[in-house]
Image (spheres, rainbow, N blue to C red):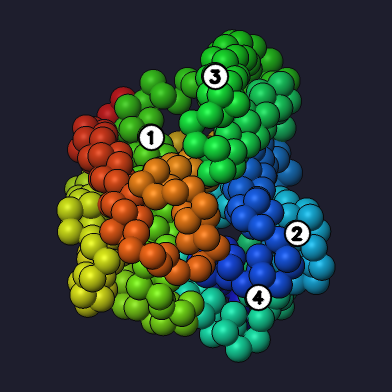
Amino acid sequence: MLFSGKGAVLVVVVLGVFMSAVDVTIVVLALPSIAQDLGSGLGPVVWVILSYSLVISSLTTQLGRLGDAFGRGFMYNLGLIIFSLGSLLCGLSTSGSMLIASRVIQGIGASMIQANSGAVIADHFESWERGRAFGYTALGWSMGAIVGILLGGLVVTYAGWRYIFLINVPIGLILSIIGLRVIKSRRGIPGCFDIPGASILFFLLLLVSIASYRSIFEGLSQSVSILTAACLLLLALFILVEKRSLEISSERSQCPVIDLGIFGNRYLSYSLLAAFLQSVGMFASSFILTLYLQGVRGLTPLETSLLLLPSYLISSMIAPIAGRLSDRYGSRIPASLGISLMLTSSAIYALILNPGMPLEYIVIISIVGGIGSSIFFPANNRAVMVSASSDIYGGVSGLLRTLNNIGTLLSYSIAIAISSTTVPREIALTAFLGERVIGGIEAGFVEGLRSSFAVSAAILLLTLILSIQRGEEDLKHGNTTR
């Protein structure tokens, strides 16, 4: 049959990742148009991103546990349906509030998809096959980003921003129908959840989002400082609750949101921390480049998308090859190489970005960073899943995505906060809305962008150290050092 076997499972997962990637890159390019059409200021537009990231970061681990309890395939397919519904509502939104609420629904579906995609692959592929499978999911991400970049420019320019959401609806529904036929809904451990821990994590991330939002308008004000202190207190409380939850988890009545016990495995814990720090250091890079290309150079969304396209095209060809290399040689060397290339890209931007920089330099540097991402993701994802036992694939996959999404949320927050420190805040806000920075202060704004890339490079350097120090892997038996 056409839709049967591992190949069909991989197609459904890759296309699900593809759809998620389209939504990420396409939304970034559409933010100025959304603000203008809905008559919203920067505030509601920022929450279009923050609300989505907040929901995913808060729910992914627990939804991975639901996949372990009720079937990973079932949860993955349900996520596709909910994501499609949320996308439809986003496209029909008539106000900023409705769009944000619709993004919350979309985020719930995306949480189910992200939490269970890695577990579905781990269920259907042996340990020596997963690097290649994750390589194809990285290809799906890169191709989705390509389509998102292209469609973002084309759709916003010629059709309107609503269609960037509506395009997800038929894709998601078709994938869910196919997924119901081909994905085996395997289970792991019985359902056990950590409601107190999940609740604290939600409020912690909510405060992080509010602090990030207010810092855009107020800088490091007294209220932002108070919110930051509250975040630290909630973080300490979260760690205490998770330690307690781990102590009583043997009863199977409660499982920690983040199983602190897994951090006793150096290979797994370093791989998870590398994924988190890579997200913090790298995910806002396309946003920073968009600010530069549109706010400083005056390019249109379509011109911006075409300029960034080569990076995604080349990285999409590299990802499957990188996945095979990690299957053959282990994950540490490919993942570390990928981080090194991303670090190089950010460091070059931090050193030489200027208002008159030749655009071909942007293309070349972006290609270097894109290749690094395409090498890192399949290798590091494989490292995480090969370290986990089969009964907790869903939980570990969900934890990986949770850390990715928390890192992404922090990445945007850090980029926005740093980029707005070198020019009057009102000027920075207009740039965030896609307007061009004029009046002789372009150099000052670019200085803020360079500072963002410098912080990114520092974080990626720490990521590289973790990746190198993660330990060795027994390729024959799929075991790792602990």
Residue type at tag 4: Trp
Residue under label 3, please give it. 229
Is 4 rendered above or below residue 303?
A: above
Say which label, 4 or 3, has the lower sequence index: 4
Say which label, 3 or 2, has the lower sequence index: 2
**Alpha carbon separation for disc pair 4 and 3:** 38 Å
Q: Nearer the viewer, mark 2 or mark 1?
A: 2
Label 3 neighbour load within 10 Å: few <14, some 14-19, many 20+: few
Residue under label 1, please give it. 273
Say which label, 1 or 4, has the lower sequence index: 4
- Which of 450 and 200 lies nearest the eye of the viewer? 450
Q: Secondary structure at mark 3?
A: helix
Q: Secondary structure at mark 4?
A: loop
Q: Quadrant of the N terminus?
A: bottom right
Q: Position of residue 257 (x, y in %)?
A: 61, 28
Q: Quadrant of the C terminus?
A: top left
Residue under label 2, please give it. 96
Residue type at tag 3: Ala
Position of 323 compared to 468: left or right? right
Is 306 rendered above or below residue 297?
A: below
C-beta proximity under 8 Å, tags 3 and 2: no
Say which label, 2 or 1, has the lower sequence index: 2
Q: Nearer the viewer, mark 4 or mark 2?
A: 2
**Alpha carbon separation for disc pair 3 and 2:** 30 Å
**Alpha carbon separation for disc pair 1 and 4:** 35 Å
Q: Secondary structure at mark 2?
A: helix
